[in-house]
Image: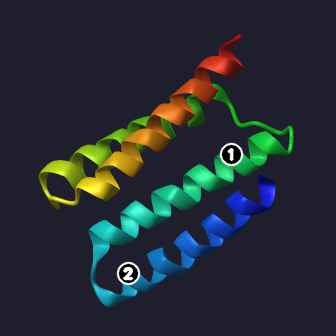
């Protein structure tokens, strides 16, 4: 699982940097948020989780990105993925609360 998130993170980092320099800033932010998500999850899997506020901030950013993808970009698939990952990270936040 650890290796899967590292590979996804590297893929999203490359795509995010490419889209940043090719002029598609909203798609670059979308990919770079996934890099942040993968970094948070990899740190959690390696038994060094971040503070709960980082989880909450990343959750809010992913939900806002999902809403942006739905209503502004009209990209339903990207919106669903962002909202799904935001919900997953919110559950991790709740698990750390206990």
Residue denoted by label 2? 19
Residue 47 falls left or right of residue 37: right
Residue 13 falls left or right of residue 39: left
Question: Residue drawn at (62%, 65%), measured in percent from left and top?
Answer: 9
- Residue 93 position within the rendered picture, expressed as x and y whole percent measured from the top left: 60, 25
Which quadrant of the view contains residue 95?
top right
Residue denoted by label 1? 41
Question: Residue drawn at (66%, 15%), measured in percent from left and top?
Answer: 97
Q: Secondary structure at mark 2?
A: helix
Q: Residues within 10 Å of mark 2 (few under 14, many from 20)?
A: some
Q: Is residue 61 visible?
A: no
- Residue 70 position within the rendered picture, expressed as x and y whole percent measured from the top left: 20, 50
The answer for how far apart the CA atoms under marks 1 and 2 are is 23 Å
Whether tag 1 and tag 2 are in contact, CB under 8 A, the answer is no
The single residue placed furthest to the top in the displayed view is: 98
Which quadrant of the view contains residue 53?
top right
- Residue 65 position within the rendered picture, expressed as x and y whole percent measured from the top left: 32, 49
């Amino acid at each position: 699982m650890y290796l899967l998130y590292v590979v996804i993170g590297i893929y999203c980092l490359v795509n995010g940097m490419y889209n940043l320099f090719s002029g598609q800033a909203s798609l670059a932010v979308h990919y770079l948020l996934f890099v942040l998500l993968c970094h948070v999850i990899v740190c959690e899997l390696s038994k060094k989780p971040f503070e709960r506020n980082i989880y909450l901030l990343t959750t809010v950013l992913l939900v806002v990105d999902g809403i942006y993808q739905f209503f502004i970009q009209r990209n339903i698939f990207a919106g669903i993925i962002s909202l799904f990952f935001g919900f997953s990270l919110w559950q991790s936040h709740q698990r750390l609360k206990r």
